[in-house]
Image (tube, grey):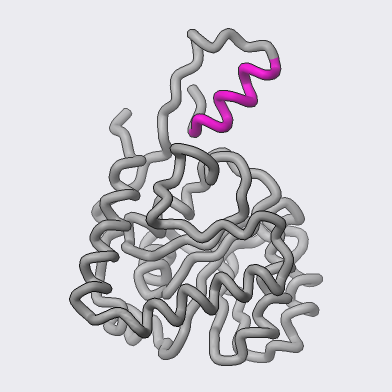
Amino acid sequence: LAVSAALKADMVALGMPEDRITVHYTGVDRGQFYVRAREAAKTAVGMSGPLLVSVGALIARKRHAIVIEAMKQLPDATLIIVGEGPDRAALEKQAAACGARVRFLGSQPHDVIADWLAAADAMVLMSASEGLANAWIEALASGTPVIISDVGGARGEDVVHLSRRRPRHGEARQIAFHIGDKARHAVAREPLDNALQRHRLAGAGRARDQPV
C-alpha cells in the first residue's frame, strides 16, 4: 500500500512492481474533523484575528523554521504549532522575536487538534518530504485551506487544486505572500461564499478518505 500516487511512483522507481502497489489514501475521523463556524471555533480556543495552525513533529524535515520566519512579515497573524520533537528548543528560540504570536502546544489529542484546525484560517506545513500528511486531510475535512510545499502527495492528483496553495521553493517571503493572499481572499468573500467554499474543501478531504 502507498498513501499517495507520488509515493507509489517513488516505490516503482526503487524497483517495486507497479501492479502490486495500491494507492490507499489516509483516512480521517469525520466525527472529529468537520466544518464549523470559524469565528465560533476561534472563540472556543480563545483566539481572534488571523490564525494559522501547523501540525507536525518538531523535526528538521517539517521545516517549521521557514514558517516562523515568514511570521515576521505577518504582524497581525498568530501561529499555533502542534507537535513535539527534538527541535523544539531551537524553534522556540527563533520564535521569541515574534513574541506571543507564535505558540507551541506540544503533542495534543485528536479532539484538540480538530478544534484548532476548525478555527484556523489556514493550515501551514512546509515539509521537505511527505507521502500524504494526515494534517493536510484533517484540515481539508475541517474546511480549512492548506498552504503546503510542492512535495510528495501535494503534487498531481493527491491534493485537490482548488484547496491548496503550494509555495514551490519554500522561502519565507514566498510563504508569507501565499498566507497573506489567502487571508485577503477570506476577508473579501461574502459569508455565504465562504461557507460554500469551506464545504467544498471538506468534500475534498472526504474524497481522499477511503474505508479500510
Quarter of the C terminus within the rendering: top left
Q: Where is residue 126? Give x, y as percent.
A: 64, 58
Q: Is residue 169 above or below residue 106?
A: above
Per the image, is 8 magenta?
yes
Q: Is residue 74 above or below residue 9?
A: below
Report the front residue among 162 and 46. Answer: 162
Residue 32 in view of the camera: no
Q: Where is residue 34? Give x, y as percent.
A: 27, 60
The quarter of the picture where residue 139 lies is bottom left
Main SS class of the magenta portion in the image: helix
The stretch of residues the image draws in magenta is 4-14
The quarter of the picture where residue 23 lies is top left
Residue 193 in view of the camera: yes
Query: Could you tell me which residue is drawn at 70 percent across and 74 percent down?
Result: 173
Report the front residue among 187 and 62. Answer: 187
Query: Could you tell me which residue is drawn at 34 percent across and 49 percent down?
Result: 205
Q: Residue most toward the left?
A: 192
The quarter of the picture where residue 140 lies is bottom left
The number of numbered discs placed on residues in the rendered structure image is 0
Q: Where is residue 196? Give x, y as percent.
A: 21, 66
Q: Is residue 53 left or right of residue 106?
A: left
Query: Could you tell me which residue is drawn at 30 percent across and 84 percent down?
Result: 39
Report the front residue among 193 and 32. Answer: 193
Per the image, is 156 magenta?
no
Q: Is residue 101 left or right of residue 136?
A: right
Q: Where is residue 77? Give x, y as percent.
A: 54, 85
Query: Could you tell me which residue is drawn at 67 percent across and 84 percent down?
Result: 73
